[in-house]
Image (cartoon, coloured by chain):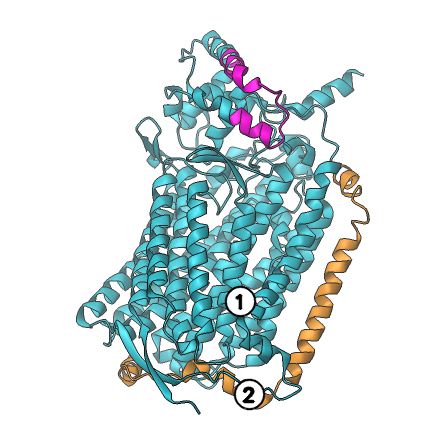
Amino acid sequence: MAALEKFQYDNKIVRNFAFATIIWGVVGMLVGLWVALLMVFPQWNVTTGNGTVGFTFGRLRPLHTNAVIFAFVGNGIFMGYYYSIQRLLKARMASDMLSKIHFWGWQLIIVAAAITLPLGMTTGKEYAELEWPIDIAITIIWVVFGWNMFATILKRRERHLYVAIWFYIATFVTVAVLHLVNSFEFPVSFFHSYSWYAGVQDALVQWWYGHNAVAFFLTTPYLGLMYYYMPKAANRPVFSYKLSIIHFWSLIFLYIWAGPHHLLYTSLPNWAQSLGIVFSFMLIFPSWGGMINGLLTLRGAWDKVREDVILKFMVVAVTAYGMATFEGPMLSLKTVNAISHFTDWTIAHVHVGGLGWNGMLTFGILYWLIPRIFKTELFSKRLANFHFWIATLGIIFYAVPMYWAGFQQASMWKQFTDSGQLKYQFIETVTYMKPFYAIRSFGGFLFVTGAIVMLYNLFMTVAKGKLVANEDAEAPALEKSVSHHTGEHWHRKVERKPILFLIATLIVILIGGIIELVPTFLIKSNVPTISSVKPYTPLELQGRDIYRREGCFTCHSQMVRPFRSETERYGEYSKAGEFVYDHPFQWGSKRTGPDLAREGTLNLKKTDSWHFNHMDDPQAISPGTIMPAYSFMLDRELDTASTPAKIKAMRTMGVPYAEGYEYIANKDLVNQAAKIQGNLLNDSIRVKPNAEVLAIIAYLQRLGTDTEKNKIAENKN
Amino acid sequence: MFKFVKQYAESIDGVNIYPMISLLIFFLFFVVLLYYVKKMDKNKVKEISRIPLDDNEQLSGTLIQNNLKQV
């Protein structure tokens, strides 16, 4: 045996990420509470600087999701990761400098998100809203994180890579692939870009990314943490290490295919939907294998759960993981999805995962970790217990009303009277939801209160302790040459060779990605585009950018599914060919307000002055609505200087604007605006010729009209 | 209902085979995985699974354990 080597673990980086996850966690949850309240008190949606800074639902909701996913959970991952990987490898991180760059870079990215999102700078793609310069920064920081990880793995003193590390490696590899593929965008200015993909393809790539952000950012790294901290907290090894191997490989193989379940009944090709369903359903097996493995780790230690608050947090976390991963496959079944999709059911589902699994596990790890690295005791066990109960209650108060609301919403959308008419106006389904939104906010309030109590408790703990910045450790060095006996197990070989492991992981996740994405891209050359579908006019294009800036897609879908209840309410179901010029697609995932895919068609069409007044004061036009007012658009001037660059960008991406059209586009824009201005004047409404409201009206009036032209022509024949 | 979708999904040659290929790949992958996991050396597995517990916690480990018992 080699001589013992002395070295030190870096606890400073662990502390930094721990503080970051606590602070950003509280911030992200407060923003969540705020957006929840906006759905009860729509008058609290405010903007300043003539709409420059917006604290409206559409701009703050992405801030909430980004803050909790990438700031709270992200920093939580790195906190748990830096502590555990050093100890699992018996080595200090390869480079303190890279650790530092990782930490500060990640915080800067978060700050950039917190600034740009309220300014309305968004790509319009859920969970990937950050604009291209930030995307590049994310790529660089991610490489720093991965580089440091592999450099540490290579200088390790423990031959075997423990299962937690496989999960870290899979996280690194897959998030890199997802981020690169989904962020393919065409910059038009420093903080504005268009997704390179359009329509159906954009939707598929986006939800391939979106679902796997859940898989490889909210799940795999947390499973890695579970496999380290559960055994630590329970002081016994994981229930079955063999099960963890099966869990790992089948989970990462299956997850990557599941994305299309976000697009059931949409215009996505049917075969892709079917693939998504099959693999989503199979996911239940590895997920539950993992959950059972986690819970059974406590075998013979259940008496400790009663006394140990850390184990309580972890048990609720793993149970929530089990519930969410049971519900997920169920929601992927078409019959269930027909009810749940676009409703608050989905919101309940993600919060069981977010608050329960990610939140509770992070809290458990924090209570375990902070006293350890500060070499002290927890300030107050009673407060920690209080946190546990109030957080658990918070989850219940959040989830139960949202499940109820979602189910009610769907049933109200779908009901017909005996005479065959839709039973409810859309607005009735909105007003019905309000009490549920209020109770949900209360649940969120309880949960964030718990987090603030934790902040205080941990602050006091830190105050009475002292950070062991460099913790002494010793372990024998790895022997360089090992004689392998023949017939050695293949997996152990792979475990010893991290690079091989990385490649194997990459191959496993690429199989699903390639089989799903490639045919959809081949389709492009095969799609018989609908001849009546034309590119947007310059004014409509500008209007569409305003639609995206304000995050209208966070509440309005643009996707009529092939159900009688939807075609009756909105008109003809949506076809893939209608979206070929939509960079990015704006199908949305939630229908707090009505679908807008056919907003401009004859049976839904409103007058220009209706839209004008509705933007100014939605409550006056549609009593009971929770839509924010956008009165600043009535006055704010449209940025026409950007038109040529936007047209040019669109043409580069294949939208058939004529060569040189960018030079005369603004002339068309002015003419179309003047026409709407004239319509408004007929109703005695005076507006500047370049007010933003004209562009958004033009866009809304255009929606769905392309295919209607076809129909009108058919009828004439 | 899905006439429109079918119309161009069908224009990819043999699109129907995709779901079957996918399922087959996973099935084979899973069977091979199961086989090898089954064949793993039990003692070695036991040893690996103890890696997280095998570190020198000369910090306040006992202190915290006592502390937690009272929670």
Query: A125 and A608: which one is in front?
Result: A125
Q: Does the magenta run of residues contain A56?
A: no
Residue A606 falls in image quadrant: top right
Q: State the mark number for residue B44.
A: 2
Q: Position of residue A690 (x, y in %)?
A: 42, 16
Q: Position of residue A430 (x, y in %)?
A: 49, 38
Query: Which colour is chain B painted?
Result: orange
Q: Position of residue A40 (x, y in %)?
A: 39, 41
Query: Marks 2 and 1, Cα distance to the nearest angstrom?
Result: 29 Å
- Check the image and report above or below for A274 versus A622: below
Q: Quadrant of the N terminus of chain A?
A: bottom left
Residue A461 falls in image quadrant: bottom left
Q: Position of residue A611 (x, y in %)?
A: 48, 21
> Do labels 2 and 1 touch, CB within 8 Å?
no
Task: Write down the residue under mark 1.
Answer: A322
Magenta segment, which residues? Answer: A646-672
Residue drawn at x 66%, y 53% as measured from the top left: A514
How many residues crowd mark 1 within 10 Å: few (<14), some (14–19), many (20+)? many
Q: As drawn, which residue projects farthest toward the front?
A: A481
| Chain in cyan on the image | A
In the image, A639: left or right of A266? left
